[in-house]
């Protein structure tokens, strides 16, 4: 299929382009942007089997440019399409408003409707709310992008009215819906328009606070609870705005003669991930937990993990090796240790179901070897 994409270098166009390249490698893409020549546009329109019309004007110096960019260019493009392909147009929820931008977007929609009625082609009109995600443009028309960009650089943000409610669509959800339209299965509304789901509603102040918290959490090696879809999408967007020189954080390494222990990442209600380094022929642990539970994965070296229930004599042993990684559960109610039986350092990735709390460590010393128990 030959696919024409206007606004190909913009926020939506860029995300759509890269998705199409990987999801539909046999398709021929015709990216059109503001720097494309009339000849390139004409060639793309002549071959197009499907059109994603994502180009538009939303912050012109002269308000008259609204109609020029959103109505006139749309009408001109539609006249050029020789095969009368289906057309997706990215409109705006402001098309329902009577401001210059909304009027121009509504006029673009009308041009697409007229094209569909005249040619019999399918028209997919999406009135999108504010979009957010990677590759969006800060200090332009997205508060999410501006806040993420500034907070990631320690710059101030301005929240004039924190109670303002925003309706937001994530870029991956938009692209996924566009691909459904490409397959002839758009999500339609009762009024004949198309829509992207889900739409996330959040007030401006709450969103700003979330983004500011992301920066603090990174400094503490904390990760937000991403079981909430909006939080996961907003956090991914925030990370995409990190300066390239600021990707890394250095955790605190606790070292002694036995090796080291480093808390790598805190996952809030989902616990923490740590790295344990054991020197050759060193045994660590010798404790048990009431409720806390862990998982150990040897990624380098070899050793033995041993378990025993308090007041019992039977010791359970698991031989472990980085050559054949295993995920070994450390259940509550078992004292346990881990011995490096090799001649090189043994590296163990450890997950615990809760972050360490010095005020409530739930860790009690008890040798695994019953002969050592006092």
Image (cartoon, grey):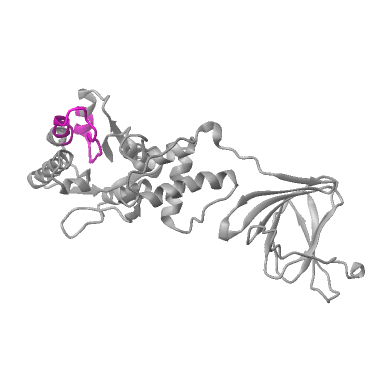
Of 132 and 182, which appears nearest the observer?
A: 132
Relative to 224, residue 306 above or below: below
Q: Is residue 43 magenta?
A: yes
Relative to 312, residue 56 above or below: above
Q: Residue furthest bottom?
A: 311
Q: Position of residue 210 (x, y in %)?
A: 45, 50
**Which portion, as a residue range, is magenta?**
42-70
Quarter holding the N terminus?
A: top left
Residue 327 seen by the camera: no
Query: Residue shown at 12%/34% (left/top)?
Result: 79
Quarter holding the C terminus?
A: bottom right
Q: Is residue 37 left or right of residue 200?
A: left
Q: Position of residue 25 (x, y in %)?
A: 38, 40
Q: Residue furthest front?
A: 160
Q: Is residue 220 left or right of residue 307?
A: left
Q: Is residue 180 left or right of residue 220?
A: left
């Amino acid at each position: 299929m030959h696919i024409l994409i206007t606004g190909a270098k913009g926020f939506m166009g860029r995300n759509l382009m890269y998705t199409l390249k990987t999801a539909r490698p046999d398709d021929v893409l015709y990216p059109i942007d503001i720097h494309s020549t009339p000849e390139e546009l004409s060639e793309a329109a002549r071959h197009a089997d499907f059109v994603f019309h994502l180009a538009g004007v939303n912050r012109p110096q002269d308000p008259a440019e609204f109609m020029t960019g959103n109505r006139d260019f749309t009408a001109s493009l539609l006249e050029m399409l020789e095969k009368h392909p289906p057309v997706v147009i990215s409109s705006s929820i402001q098309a329902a408003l009577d401001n210059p931008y909304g009027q121009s977007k509504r006029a673009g929609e009308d041009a697409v409707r007229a094209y569909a009625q005249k040619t019999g082609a399918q028209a997919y009109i999406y009135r999108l709310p504010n979009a957010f995600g990677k590759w969006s443009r800060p200090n332009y028309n997205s508060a999410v992008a501006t806040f993420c960009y500034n907070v990631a650089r320690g710059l101030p943000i301005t929240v004039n009215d924190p109670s303002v409610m925003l309706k937001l669509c994530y870029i991956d959800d938009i692209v996924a819906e566009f691909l459904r339209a490409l397959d002839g299965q758009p999500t339609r509304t009762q009024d004949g328009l198309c829509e992207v789901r889900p739409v996330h509603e959040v007030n401006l102040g709450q969103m700003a606070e979330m983004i500011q918290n992301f920066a603090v959490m990174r400094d503490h090696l904390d990760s937000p609870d991403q079981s909430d879809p909006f939080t996961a999408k907003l956090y991914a967007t925030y990370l995409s705005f990190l300066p390239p020189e600021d990707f890394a954080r250095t955790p605190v390494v606790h070292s002694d003669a036995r090796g080291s222990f480093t808390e790598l990442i805190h996952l809030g209600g989902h616990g923490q991930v740590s790295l344990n380094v054991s020197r050759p022929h060193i045994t660590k642990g010798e404790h048990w937990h009431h409720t806390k539970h862990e998982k150990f994965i040897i990624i380098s070296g070899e050793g033995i993990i041993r378990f025993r229930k308090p007041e019992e004599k039977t010791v359970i042993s698991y031989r472990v090796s980085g050559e054949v990684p295993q995920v070994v559960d450390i259940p509550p109610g078992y004292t346990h240790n881990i011995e490096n039986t090799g001649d090189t350092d043994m590296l163990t990735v450890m997950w615990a179901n809760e972050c360490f709390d010095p005020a409530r460590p739930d860790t009690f010393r008890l040798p695994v070897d019953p002969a050592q128990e006092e």
